[in-house]
Amino acid sequence: MEKKYGRPIAEWKDLIRSSPLTRHMELVAWLKSEHGLGHGHANALVAHTLAERSEG
């Protein structure tokens, strides 16, 4: 994923955390439209990041 999109996963997760959006599909759509991620990658990143948020 790093090679394909040019940022490490930790950086994508920081972007998701700093976004004013909070709903899963809003964040997925944002990553796809604003950053060019594919649906699968965007969905996985959001799911993982939101799961961490609820565990914390």
Image (cartoon, rainbow, N blue to C red):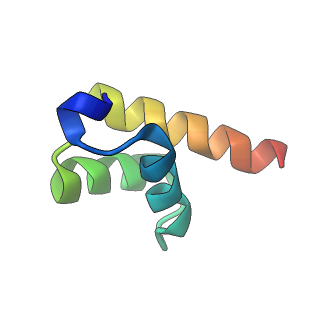
Instruction: Please name the residue shown 40% across and 47% down the image.
Output: 25
Instruction: Please name the residue shown 16% across and 46% down the image.
Output: 36
Between 15 and 43, the residue placed more toward the observer is 15
Residue 44 falls in which quadrant of the image? top left
Residue 9 falls in which quadrant of the image? top left
Q: Residue furthest right?
A: 56
User: On the picture, is 48 further left or further right than 55?
Assistant: left
Q: Residue 11's x, y, as percent?
A: 45, 51
Q: Residue furthest bottom?
A: 20
For the N terminus, the quadrant is: top left
Q: Residue 51's x, y, as percent?
A: 68, 38
Q: Total label count?
A: 0
Between 12 and 52, the residue placed more toward the observer is 12
User: On the picture, is 47 further left or further right than 27?
Assistant: right
Instruction: Please name the residue shown 77% across and 47% down the image.
Output: 54
User: On the picture, is 16 further left or further right than 1?
Assistant: right
Q: Residue 43's x, y, as percent?
A: 40, 34
Classify 4 as above or below 22.
above
Residue 22 falls in which quadrant of the image? bottom right
User: On the picture, is 3 further left or further right than 27?
Assistant: left
Is residue 29 at least partly visible in the picture?
yes
Is residue 38 at least partly visible in the picture?
no
